[in-house]
Image (tube, rainbow, N blue to C red):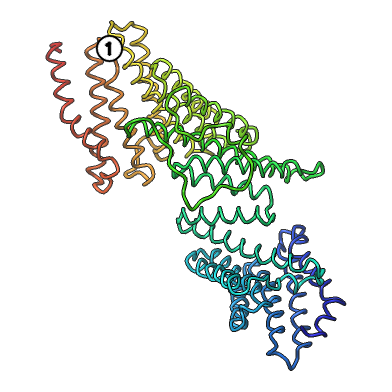
Amino acid sequence: MSKAWQDFLSSEGFERIDSATKLSDEDLNDDPEDDPYRSKYKAREIYLELQEKLKHLFEGDEENKDYHTINAVLNLKLAINYIDTEELATGEEKILKCIDDLETFKFENNVVNVYQHLLNNLGILWSARRDYNKALKFLKDAEQQYLHFKEECGSAPKSLQEYLEKPWDEDKIEHKRNLEFEKTYTLTLYYMAQVYAKLDEKELSAEYCQITLERQLEWNTYEPMEWGLCAATLSQYFISTDDYTLARHCLACAEFIYQEAIDKESPDASEEAKEKLQQGKADIERCWIKYGLGLIESSKNCLMYEDGAPSLKTSHEKFRKFNLEVTSREEQVTDQMVKDFTEARKVFLKIQQWINSAKEFYALDGRCSDYVEISQDHSTAYKYLAFFEMDLERQCKMNKRRADIISALINELNPQHYLLAVRQLMFEVAEIYSQMLDLKVAILQDEEVRPTPHALKKINLLAQQSILKYDAYLDTLKPMGKTEFPEEFASEDVRPALVASFSKGRLHSKFVTPDVKQRIANIQKSINCYKFVVDYCNKHPSIEALVPEELNICREMVALLPLKMEKIRQGAEI
């Protein structure tokens, strides 16, 4: 490196670089709203001045490799600055110029890490532009850059940071270079995990995420809060593949590492920092909730659709456990498929524990949408547990608890502000009352005795409650101030609306009454509901595929129920 440039860095260059870094990373937080990039622009001026100084000091020696490398480092800092200020085209132009300048000696010791950073940032740039395939191409190039140098040279290359900081101690230089080289590669893998996720390559995303987390532990380069949340997120992939051993391990590790962040919390931390820490803890608990729900649901599905006891899928060969001792955290909940109510209840109780803890942060007042989702998870937990309960009366009580949870939410939410959530909740509670009705009917059939007036009244009440909730849901689909439905439902509302009408048709037939006129009136209401589905599908044939089974039943009922109604009339001689 040019002695004149080294002298300049020692005398004032490093200090100016530090000033630019501080402006970019810290001072920007105090920039006014009407000038949000003021600090970024000041940092840019410093980098441009440094480039002019560099050009002057290497005048006549512009083909010098050191000049190209140092200039590339400054250009990269400028490129990031331009990208941060939303001038992506200029940022890209500067990085591509650096790539072109360094291409012929990109594997040399003094250049390879700089080149890695250039490729990483091109990947980030194209990801920001949502061209994920192009982003992946540059990140794969960065991956190959690392692997090629590692195989051919083995030793650690000069770090990009060395061009920006005072000389490192000789006794530490090898270790620090190695650390920076590996950190840069870990970032490449991290970005690849994000891009694969955007491309819906879930397994590859999970694989690269796991390698990233593993390397951060190995090199002790992790930030506890971020690491914990990433590990918890990774668990959700394993839940989706029914690999509950690895899912549980990821969550236990997430808790273990996140605890470091909690233990290190400063008493003087800002309210924002404290809130962020509490939110992360609650988010990990929400991932545990999904773990418990997934385990019980998978166990239920295995018992329903497979012969014999439910079995656990074997762990993916390409995925390994992290080198952390988390046995005590893993043992708080099973990773094996549950086979009966006793086992399912143990998981259910853990789910409730996580729900109650998560709600301490995600309260209804202030974080309404998250509170609603967690409460729906609570309802789902009762739903899955009820499957393992053989006693129909106890099943009914569990569904009553579900109805209470959802009804309480509906009463708390303002439909004007949370219309979509309220719609979903109304539909859900209508389904719950319908399920409770079916359970009560099944109980009466099992008893093989004449039902009491109280039991019949309960059946009618449940049918009425379910119909009322379906009606309340359907009313929200009507235009403001109108009493009629729109000519055509929004695409996301078509199936729910038709299923609601179909369900109402079924429910009207469930009323028990000795009054012949009332029985006929109920049948007519069933016909009207079924006919609504048939007429809508006839008018919009393209949506028949959304409700094939329901539509076939509706067409049959529209044909058969008038005959049944006439038979009742004749029998009663009305």
| Of 205 and 361, the residue lying toward us | 205
Is 219 drawn above or below residue 101 in the view shown?
above
Count how many numbered circles sit on residues in the image.
1
Where is the N terminus found, in terms of image quarters? bottom right
Q: Is 101 placed left or right of 485 in the picture?
A: right
Is 442 drawn above or below residue 283 in the view shown?
above
Residue plotted at (58% across, 31% down) = 332
Q: Is 548 placed left or right of 88 in the picture?
A: left
| Of 21 and 180, the residue lying toward us | 180
Q: Is 136 placed left or right of 26 in the picture?
A: left
Image quarter of residue 358: top right
| Of 527 and 397, the residue lying toward us | 397
Relative image position of residue 555 (x, y in whole percent): 19, 34
Is 64 drawn above or below residue 416 in the view shown?
below
Residue plotted at (63% across, 77% down) = 94
Relative image position of residue 565 (x, y in whole percent): 17, 20
Residue plotted at (50% across, 35% down) = 335
Q: Residues within 10 Å of mark 1 (few under 14, many from 20)?
A: few
Residue plotted at (13% across, 23% down) = 563
Residue linked to disc 1 = 513
Q: Is 189 placed left or right of 380 in the picture?
A: right
